[in-house]
Structure formats: C-alpha cells, structure tokens
Amino acid sequence: MATKRITQETFDAVVKENMDDFEMDAEEAVADAVKQFESQGVNLMNIIKQAPQATSDGQQSASRHPILFILQNIQDILNNKSQSDDQNLLKECKLFQQECSQGPAYRSVAADNKAYTIMLRVCQRMYDNASSLSMALQSLAALIDGQPDLVDNVGIQFIMDTLKKYSSDSLIQESTINVIRLACIMHESNRQKFVGCDLIEQLILVLRNFKTHIAVIKEACSTLRVLTLDDDIRVPFGKGHEHAKMIASECNGLQLLIDIIKLHYQDTTIYSEICATIGKLAVRNEYCQEVVDLGGLTLVTKALAERMDESMIVARSCSLLRAISGNDDVKAAIVNAGCISLIITAMDRHPKHVHIAEQSCAVFASLALRHPQHCADIVASGGADFILKAMKIHEDVESVQKQGCLAIRNLVARTREYCNVFLEAGAEAILRQIRQKHKHSDDEAKAALRDLGCAVQLKELWTGTPYKG
C-alpha cells in the first residue's frame, strides 16, 4: 500500500511543468503526473487530480483550484464586514458545498488552506439569522465530512450554543445535528467533549420536541448511534457503552424511541432509523428486556407479519431481533411470538438481500445458543435448508458466511441429532469452501465442521512449553 504523501502544491507544480516544458494539454499533463507519482508509491488520495485554473486576469502564475478561489472570495467578504454582502456570502457558501461534494481531496485541500476557520467565521457572522445560519452550517458540515480532526473546542461550544438557542427551529436543529454527527464519526475525543456539553440530553430533548419532523428524527437517531461507536483506533478504550447507558436509562431513551416508532409505524425511514438506534442501545440484559416490556417485540413482529414485502423493514426488524436476543428470557419471547416462522418467510421472500440473509442467520445463531428446544423449532421450520441456501447464494459475502457458520454450530452443538440434517443438505462442502475462501471466518467454519462430526485438524496455538532461561 502506498504510504508516501505529497502536497497539492507539489502535484500542481509537476502538472504545470508538463504543460510549460513539454507542451502537454491539461488532461495529458495531469494523467502523466498521476502516473509518475503512483509509480513512486505516492498515495494521491488527498490530491485534486485537475490542472489549476488561471485567475480572472489570465495570469497562469497565479493559477489555483476553484475551491481556493471560492475560499478567498468568502474571506474577502468576511473582512469587508458589510451586511449587504451576506447574500453574496451565501452564494459563495453554496459553491463551496458543491466543490466539497466532489470528494475527499477537495475537502482536504480546503482544510489545508484554513477553510475550517473561515467557515466557522461564516457561521458566527450568521448566528442571528436563522435561514442564513442553516446554509452556513451546511457548508461547515460539507468541509468536516471525513475530517473530524478539524473541529476544535471553540467550534464545539459554538455548535452546542446554536443547538440550544434555536431549540424550536427544525431546520437549524437538523443542520446543527448533522455537523455534530460528522464531527463525532471516528473521533472519540470529539464525542466525549460533546457529551460533556450535555449533547445526549439535548438530542433527547430534540426527539421529544420534533416527534413529527422526519428529517430531524433521522439526524438525531443517527447521531445517537454514532455516540455508541468505538471506531477511533487512536483510543484504546472508548466510552460507547457508557454513552449507550446514558441514553437508554438515564435519559429514558428507549421509552421515547418506542413512542416515536409507534407514532410513525408506517414510515419506512423512521422505522428503520429507530430500529437501528434501539439495536445500538441494547448493550445490557435489562435493556433487551425493557425493549420487550415497552412493546418493541410486538411492534417488530407486527411489522414482519404486515410488511413482509418491504425489504428495508424486514432487514431492520431482523437486525433488532438479533440485538435484543442476547437476553435468554427475550430469546424465549421471540420464539413464542412466532418470529422463527416469520424469519423463514423473510429469507424465502428476499433470498438475494444480503442484509436479510446475514441478520436472519445471526438471529438463528443467537436463539439456538444453549437452547435445545429453540434448535428443534428452527430445524422443524426448515431453518437448516434456508441457512445453507443463504450461504450458497451469498458465497462471496463473508459476513453472511460467518453468521451461517455460527448458526450451524449452535444448532448442532447440544443437539447432535440434527447433524445429519445439515450434512445431507451439503453443509460440509460449503464449510470447507469457506475455510479456503474467507480466512477471517476460518475459526467459525472449523467449529461448525467439528460439531458436525467432520474431520478437521485443530491447531494448538500454544503448547505451554516453559521458558528456559
């Protein structure tokens, strides 16, 4: 993998040299520069692969990329401090968003040229104008997408102040929460700083105040999920679990989310968002049980029965069942609610849907773990055939293969009488193919083969040989 990096200025200088010294046109000059640097092992991910444009007076020596012209225009307007220029400022912000949307390289170049400071100044200038502030926040979001390191303490405080000041403005809430979400993805420090500024309480308040605003609910739920992640490799231990606990119990988030899903039961977007959010909060036994007690399982069962043809609804429902089935009492409730037959129907109705295949296998794996009667119910309903069918259809999707292996292993580990059901259906060949094709699922495939009674070589990783000093 290429690890060397260069600056945009270095790349642009080579392009200019190709055009000036070798009389190449712009497209040819860029292609040659790309080839040259890639042959040297340079990573060009953050480089704009276009020739800079000349200034308005035609001076090639002052050539720059359009996004830098726009930034300069924005900075000039900010320095002018004339309120009459606000409309021009918003036009430039719109152009800035368009440039940022072209890819990470454009955002990276903008960031290298102090775009964060400039866009934060725009937001501060528009602070007392709700409609203009929304556009400014969208421009800030366009910049920090994939670049959460840009956000500093001043920005965090400003964003939280905005969220609290405009507590009744749905458009500002949506735009501000979007900025927060992007600032927290893969950035544990930002997450903890925002939570320290009462973000969770504010998001819960937003959900209470905007129960009928689909876009706001979607952003708030997405951001709550981001707070539960542990995706920052720079931090050994995140606080995702603690954040989930705060949302679920201290802020009574589960009750609120289920109330909202009941209100918007027919809305596919809201149903999907809330199912995904509840799934992220079901991190403790009591939370799984609380979801059932609040009517969450009844809602999921109803959705599967009534909206079986809607793949998104089915996928999210199965995902939520997987999340809450870690509790043994909830497992029994899921089985008693008739979910096994509903999941079988879902797999039959949507055989090519990857997410449904993965989540269905995962639910079966969870229900079967340490519960022989559940194993009997799954096999009696034809679960073995559908698990293997999903693994055949999605043979290139490792997540499906892994969950399929776990399901097979759990279904036969304590109920050996079902081994022949899988073996006669061709399970051994599928599992051996997984070992060859999906190295990250080798342990799961090996465990399934072992419990099916197939010949498998188990490698002893450590023999306990004492150290000889």
Image: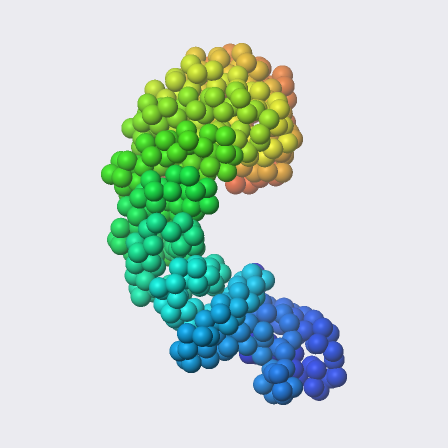
Q: Quadrant of residue 56?
A: bottom right
Given residues 442 and 66, the one toward you in this image is 66
- In the shown orientation, is residue 36 left or right of residue 240? right
Give the total of numbered labels: 0
Given residues 306 and 232, the one toward you in this image is 306
- In the shown orientation, is residue 102 left or right of residue 191? right
Image coordinates for residue 439, horizontal then vertical, percent: 55, 41
Colour mapping used in the image = rainbow
Depicted 354 relative to depicted 90: above or below: above
- In the shown orientation, is residue 221 left or right of residue 255? right
Q: Quadrant of residue 371?
A: top left
- Farthest residue to the front: give it: 84
Q: Quadrant of residue 69?
A: bottom right
Image coordinates for residue 258, horizontal then vertical, percent: 37, 31
Q: Residue at x 65, y 75 (%)?
A: 51
Image coordinates for residue 52, horizontal then vertical, percent: 62, 77
Image coordinates for residue 35, horizontal then vertical, percent: 67, 70
Q: Residue at x 46, y 61 (%)?
A: 135
Residue 70 seen in the figure: yes
**Which quadrant does the N terminus fall into?**
bottom right
Residue 239 seen in the figure: no
Given residues 83 and 449, the one toward you in this image is 83
Q: Residue at x 50, y 34 (%)?
A: 267
Q: Residue at x 28, y 46 (%)?
A: 201
